[in-house]
Amino acid sequence: MSNDPIDRLMALADAARDGAYAPYSKFQVGAAAEFEGGHIVTGANVENGAFPSGICAERNAIAAGMAKLGPTARLKRIAVSARDATGVDRDAPPCGACRQVIAEHGYGAHVMFRWEGRAIERPMSELLPFSFVL
């Protein structure tokens, strides 16, 4: 594994996909969230037959981090990784709901995901420029 923090976080997101429960879409997503202080927590998407009841990998990782670190924890960066049913890496920027959750817990955070076949990094403020933040 690379010593570069971005490569390392993306590799953890890749590995987190293995925990995905995606029997309906067969689209496995993993996320690795790094909080201030260096704490890293991973999550995977979990689908449900009652479709609105599923949850994205990003929100799973952030929720696990908040549960572990407490309500004042701040997100520093998050990596998202997805693959399809054939095992091919897919582009997977966070959905709108995840963007809002990321912004709430770290508007200054950076988000990494694959786009057009390569890993890119963008500031949250670019992905959701007018987010609702209290």
Image (spheres, rainbow, N blue to C red):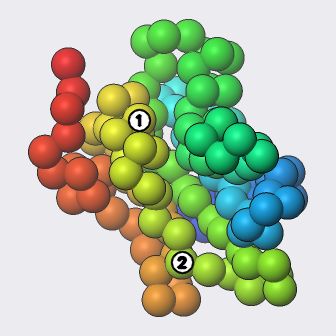
Residue 91's label in the rendered image is 2
**Gap between marks 2 and 1 measured at Cα:** 20 Å
Q: Nearer the viewer, residue 13 or 92?
A: 92
Residue ranking furthest to the left: 130
Q: Quadrant of residue 126?
A: bottom left
Please state which amino acid type lies under the numbered disc 2: Asp
- The percent coordinates of residue 4 (x first, y second) are 58, 64
Left-right relation of 78 to 86: left
* 19 over 54 or under it: above or below: below
- The percent coordinates of residue 124 (x first, y second) are 30, 50
Left-right relation of 23 to 121: right
Q: Secondary structure at mark 2?
A: loop
Q: Nearer the viewer, residue 77 or 60?
A: 60
- The percent coordinates of residue 104 (x first, y second) are 33, 30
Q: Quadrant of residue 41?
A: top right
Left-right relation of 11 to 128: right
Q: Residue at x 63, y 65 (%)?
A: 81
Q: Residue at x 81, y 78 (%)?
A: 85
Q: Which residue is mark 1?
A: 101
Q: Residue at x 37, y 51 (%)?
A: 96
Q: Secondary structure at mark 1?
A: helix
Please state which amino acid type lies under the numbered disc 1: Val
* 120 over 116 or under it: above or below: above
